[in-house]
Structure formats: C-alpha cells, structure tokens
Amino acid sequence: MRSLFKPFSKGSGLAWATLFPVTYLLHIVEEYYGGGGFPQYMLKHYHVDMTEARFVILQLIGLIAMILGLWLSARLRFPKTMLVIMASVVAMNGAIHLIRSAANVRYEPGLITGLALWIPLGLTTVYLNRAEMSSARLIFSIAIGLAISCLVELIQAV
C-alpha cells in the first residue's frame, strides 16, 4: 500500500492523508443516522427531496473520488496540493453545517463530525502545508476546495 502512495511515505504523510477518508466515513454515518438522517432533515427544513439511496450513492461517489484523488495526487506528485484541496473541502463542509445549525438554532446531521473532526482537520492541514507551497499554489488549492464545496451543495439541492 505504501508504494502506491510513495510521496506520502515520508514521515506521517500517508497516515495524515488517510484521516480524510476515515473521517469522511464517520461523517457519513452521522449524516445517515443523526437527527433522523440528512435526507429527512433536508426534506423537512429545505424541501429538498433526497432519497436515502441517492444520499448513499452520492456519499459513495464522494468517498471514491477522495480516495482516487489521493492516489492520483501521489502518482502524479502533487500530494500536498491535494491535501490542501481536501482540507478546504472538509473545513468548508464543517463550516456549512455549523452556519446552518447556528442560523436555524437546531442540530443538523453532520454538525458533530464537522465541528469535532473536519474543521480542525482542514484548518490544521492547511496550516501545516502552508510553508511548503507558494502563496499562489496555496490560494489556488484553497479556491479549488471551496469551489468543490459549492458544487457539492448544488448537487445535493437538485
């Protein structure tokens, strides 16, 4: 496994990269079971009709894309850029859960893992990688992550 992710093999890079799919699985579990489930929550509060099957399929696509992104970035030698992109995605997702929960004064499925795992993981990842990237590359990577977050929000609302 380590040879597949060679650029991550120095120090704890591979272990750190693994935190993203592992925390995503925990986030999916909370969204699926928490507060009656994210699909029901979206229907009740935002009139977005998302079946449980569609929710699971979208989450599996996201998880596969995350793992594939890590693998490709290792093979094509841009693992730090990918980590910052993913960090921006997860931090923004956690922030969205927090903002919606606070604005509506209610629990939203995904809030706990967003606050406890994704916001800290995302911000820490960006912080740890900032000195190893040019400012332009760092800003570009964060912008890509934020754009992906917006796309995910649009896809779930359709």
Image (spheres, helix red, strand yellow):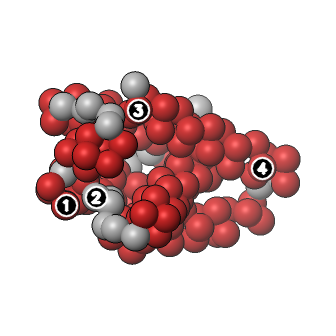
- Residue at the disc numbered 1: 34
Q: Does any portion of residue 83 appear in the rendered image?
A: no
Q: Is residue 101 left or right of residue 124?
A: left
Which residue is at the front of the view, 154 or 1? 154
Cα distance, mark 2 to mark 4? 30 Å
Q: Evaluate if marks 1 and 2 touch, with contact meaning CB atoms under 8 Å apart.
A: yes
Q: Residue at x 31, y 67 (%)?
A: 107
Identified by mark 1, the residue type is Gly
Identified by mark 4, the residue type is Ile
Instruction: Name the front one of labels 1 and 4.
Output: 1
Instruction: Name the front one of labels 3 and 4.
Output: 3
Q: Earlier in the sequence, mark 3 or mark 1?
A: 1
Q: Earlier in the sequence, mark 3 or mark 4?
A: 4
Cα distance, mark 1 to mark 2? 5 Å
Q: Earlier in the sequence, mark 1 or mark 2?
A: 1
Q: Residue at x 30, y 44 (%)?
A: 42
> x, y percentage for residue 151?
53, 32
Disc marking residue 109: 2
Which residue is at the front of the view, 135 or 33? 33
Q: Is residue 4 left or right of residue 27?
A: right
- Residue at the disc numbered 3: 157
* Mark 2, other Cα within 10 Å: few <14 / some 14–19 / many ≥20: many
- Residue at the disc numbered 4: 139
Instruction: Name the front one of labels 2 and 4.
Output: 2
Element on which disc 4 rests:
helix
> x, y percentage for residue 24?
33, 53
Q: Residue at x 28, y 58 (%)?
A: 109
Disc marking residue 43: none
Q: Does any portion of residue 106 appear in the rendered image?
A: yes
Cα distance, mark 1 to mark 4? 34 Å
